[in-house]
Amino acid sequence: MEQTLIPLPSKFLNFPLLIILVSQVAFFSSSSSHLCPSDQCLALLRFKNVISLNNCSSWGPFISNLSGSVPRKIVSWKEGIDCCFWDGVSCDNVTGNVIGLDLQNSQLYGTINSDSSLFLLSHLRWLNLAGNALCMSEIPSTISQLASLTHLILTNSDLSGSVPQEISHLSKLVSLDLSSNRYLYLENPAMERSVRNMTSLRELWLNGVEMSRVDLHSLANLSSSLVSLNLDFCNLGETNGGEFPVHIFQLPNLQSIQLGSNPMRGHFPKSNWTAPLKFLEVVGTGFSGGLPDSIGGLKFLEDLCVDVTGELPDSIGNLVSLKSLTLAGSFTGSIPASIGNLTQITDIDLSNGNFTGELPFSLGKLEHLTSLNLDLNHLTGQIPNAFSNLTKLSVLNLCSNNFSGELPFSLFNLTQPISVYFSNNQLTGPIPTSISSHSGLVSLDMSHNLLTGTVPSPLFTIPSGLVSLDMSHNLLTGTVPSSLFTIPSLQCLDLSYNQLDGHIDDFHVNKSQLYYVDLSNNKLQGPILRSLFGFVTLTVLSLASNNMTGFLDLEMIAQLKNLTFLDLSYNSLSLSLPSSNQNLSFPMFDSLHLSTCNLGEIPTFLRDSKYLETLDLSSNKIQGPLPEWFWGLGGFSLTYLNLSHNLLTSFQGFLPWQSLSVLDLHSNLLQGLLPDAVYWPEIVLISNNKLTGEIPLSICNKSDTSIIDLSDNNLNGKIPQCLGSFSDSLTVLDLRMNNFHGVIPTKFANCESLTTLALNGNQLEGSLPHSLHNCKELEVVDVGNNKISDQFPHWLGALPKLRVLVLRSNKFHGAIVSSKTKTWFPTLRIMDISHNKFTGSLPTRFFENLKAMLSVGSNELQKLQYVGPDDGYYRDDVKVTMKGIDIELTRILTIFTTIDLSNNNFSGKIASNIGMLKSLKGLNISHNNLVGCIPPSIGSLTNLEWLDLSSNQLTCRIPQNLLDLTFLEVLNFSHNKLQGPIPLGKQFNSFSNESYLGNSGLCGFPLSKECNPSETQHPPAPPFAGQQTGSMFEFGWKVVVFGYGCGVVFGLIMGYVVFSTGKPQWLVTLVEGLQPRKQKRSRIGGRRHRRSN
């Protein structure tokens, strides 16, 4: 009589216990007097021979390279020995029949066919072939012959093809595991039959099996005995749709269910959810409806991982057995205080959600908590002082939220090893002094906050296991404690982007593991500390953007053999280059930044740099042609090269690297022709040189080019037609200030990424190509100062992102026809069509459609942004006539708004609805043939800083409400036919005679002509009379004056800020505290300012 098998428990007792049970049965069989039946012994030997000899070519080379590649276990299978004693074989202790075969991870590789002798073992109850290489075998239909099977384990066995319907004949199965066979698929008929017949099934693991064609309703009849179900990565619902049967979650014996990464729909039970679940994982699905209150009924749940949406129910606190909580979806609302009831929990991960509100103080009750991750949410308020009892906490991650206030001192009283991450919040105040007594810190990241005060030096004098310290992007002041460099365990130190100053005291380098040091963007002074070059383990050293001075001998750098990244840019250093005959071995840099280091030549030690990826030698004094060896620099690894702002003269030997992504040679003295290179980089920046000749057609060879800036040269010829459509990655095409002639490329077909088209200052003719309407991302179109002859391009009004349109000084003509659509130029903020031949009246709807000029949103003021790509390589600029002067804006604020219609032939009246454009900073309609009165609605343009209506035929009186233009600095009404008294008071008291010349009918201040008594008006109250000192308007004017003293763009920014928010206290202190003194003013050194590091 055969021995009755002990049923296997669920997933939690899985295969290791199976092996133990198998070995126990084998022990009993060894004491049995029954021998293994000869037919079964022969079947096993035949299986051994086939599986050992029938190798598959794809796995053979891999297996043969493994140490001990002879198949394990079956090597003991030999004739003459009872098969019940063979490795992996178990027999019934009464009959001797083979009832178990465990060949897991036995390095078998070969195919299993339908006639395999394995299927002759009719008494087999468990079969485990997991972790072998069955060479894309299909599961044979003859598997149905193993009708006694209770456990079939074929996970990760390189199976393929369709699971046969005959597998449903294995009706005694308790455990079925076909998981991790990526080329295996299960179709609906086989699934339906299996679910119907396998009524004793307790474990079903199909994760990784393709099941996209399975109807979800076929799962509805799964056995009520089911304990563990794993359907991760099965593509359920992809083809047939449908919902996952909700009642499966309520099966009476279910302890584990995993449904991750399936596109199926579904929801959780909303009531009567009291199943004995211990493990619940539903992520990457189409489940909806959130996490219901009924989740609180799962009293035995230990591991919860879901990513649905909605709020976290308060009933989550009822899960008293919970040990791990992972909520990966877009949960909203606050974290319920009931979470403090999860006293058994060890891990909480609520990252990448949308949680709001404050952190509940009840978290302090979770004494078993080891890891808390709340990264990337919207939590606010102060971090509570609730950490005193969390003595097992080892990881605390509160990054990327909106926490404010000071750091919690209780956290730094903990003594166990702990990693703390607080970056990207709004934390303020000093670093707590209690941190100096905490010897358990392993990693501390407080970067990107508003922390003030000094770096506490006691932190670095105590015995410490600190490995990583990041306090970058704060407001820390004082000196850098030299003691922090002596922490033996410290590996990573980042204090960049603070206000640290002074000298670093010398220190002695003993044993150190330090490999990363970043002190850049501070105010450190003095020479570079020689002690830094004692860290032989350093791989990254950045001291850029400080006030360091003196000479640095590169022989010191040669001592750092492991250094791969070095940045000494933007200091006042001078590097002492070694002579060419010095035999020095320099580190194998992959990134070297020596901008503004007073270099007069290319360092010769770079000749041997085989792995260089990034090289920045910009803003030095390197002159003449580059050495020929330079063009082989870095082999095939160089991706970024910046030699801008030097004195280079030629491209001699130019042969760009195939791997190069960024080539920046702008602002040199390069002469001659552009090279006809085989490879052009993705970003080409060669503006502000003296290049001549035509653009070579080879520039269009690279289909992923994103930026081409050849502006400010002497290039000529025609613009290659291919530049309009060669790259769907092109974002910027800037060919301004050259001598190109002919027409603009007519076919802009692959221009879905183009944001800037700048062709100003050439000799281009013809019309503006209509194909530009395909470029939906266009923000800047600047074709001014050419010879283009066309009508107004009204079709550009359909571009949803166009902010800047410059057509000035061309031959555009005809009337501007209003569009009936409500989305005509919806984002336009700078419009310059001056110096053309436009005629007709200003269309009434023209101004109404300029939606972006109506107002500036408060969100735009809170975070000032600029037009164009935000990649650091290129910055859009534009020249505007501002207050009668041509001014070049080196960056274009998205909130800057101006209209220039001057020097055309417009006629008729000025439309009164122009007063709707309340965000306008400048309006110029001078030198036209406009008639009628000045619309009083212009008085509503309270942001105006300059207004020019000169040289028209305007009549009537100047409207009194123009006195409301309190930001107005430049006014020009000259050469019109205006009459009556000039308004008196406020800004109008500051304008001179020139503002009113050629208006014989005007009278009053500042003109010498006095008004008749009948025309005299009582002057308004003195400016701002009766208002308290420091009112918004008074202060606003101070800001304007202050802004124009410091630079036009700054004045514009401050004017907008004050106008929208009132008096910012920091600016009050700055403006009202100004004393007359000599100020050092910065110069703008070029049209474009590019990132050089």
Image (spheres, rainbow, N blue to C red):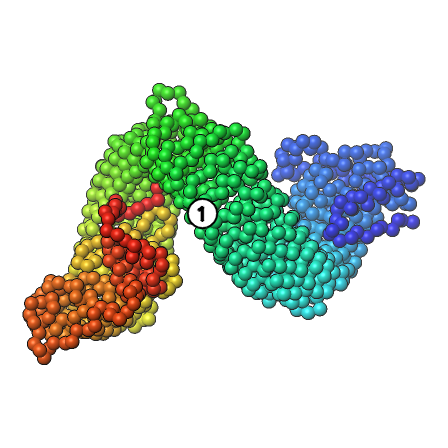
| Residue 425 position within the rendered picture, expressed as x and y whole percent measured from the top left | 48, 53
Left or right of residue 504, residue 188 in this image: right
Q: Is residue 21 above or below residue 293?
A: above
Residue ID at (73%, 44%):
129
| Residue 219 position within the rendered picture, expressed as x and y whole percent measured from the top left | 69, 62
Residue ID at (80%, 43%):
20
Tell me if residue 396 can be seen: no
| Residue 594 position within the rendered picture, expressed as x and y whole percent measured from the top left | 36, 35
Which residue is at the front of the view, 26 or 211? 26
Residue 956 figure quarter: bottom left
Residue ID at (24%, 55%):
1044
Q: Is residue 906 above or below residue 706?
A: below
- Per the image, label 1 sits on a secondary structure element best described as loop
| Residue 1065 position within the rendered picture, expressed as x and y whole percent measured from the top left | 36, 59
Residue kind at label 1, given as amino acid type: Gly
Which residue is at the front of the view, 615 or 95? 615
Tell me if residue 15 can be seen: yes
| Count of labels in the image | 1
Left or right of residue 769, residue 531 in this image: right
Which residue is at the front of the view, 33 or 928? 928
Q: In this figure, which residue is indicated by the disc labeled 1?
A: 453
Residue 935 figure quarter: bottom left
Q: Dot 1: within a 10 Å radius of its alpha carbon, few (fewer than 14), some, or many (20 or more) residues? A: some
* View extreme (right): residue: 33
Quadrant where the C terminus sits is top left
Residue ID at (17%, 73%):
1019
Left or right of residue 682, residue 899 in this image: left
Left or right of residue 117, residue 939 in this image: left
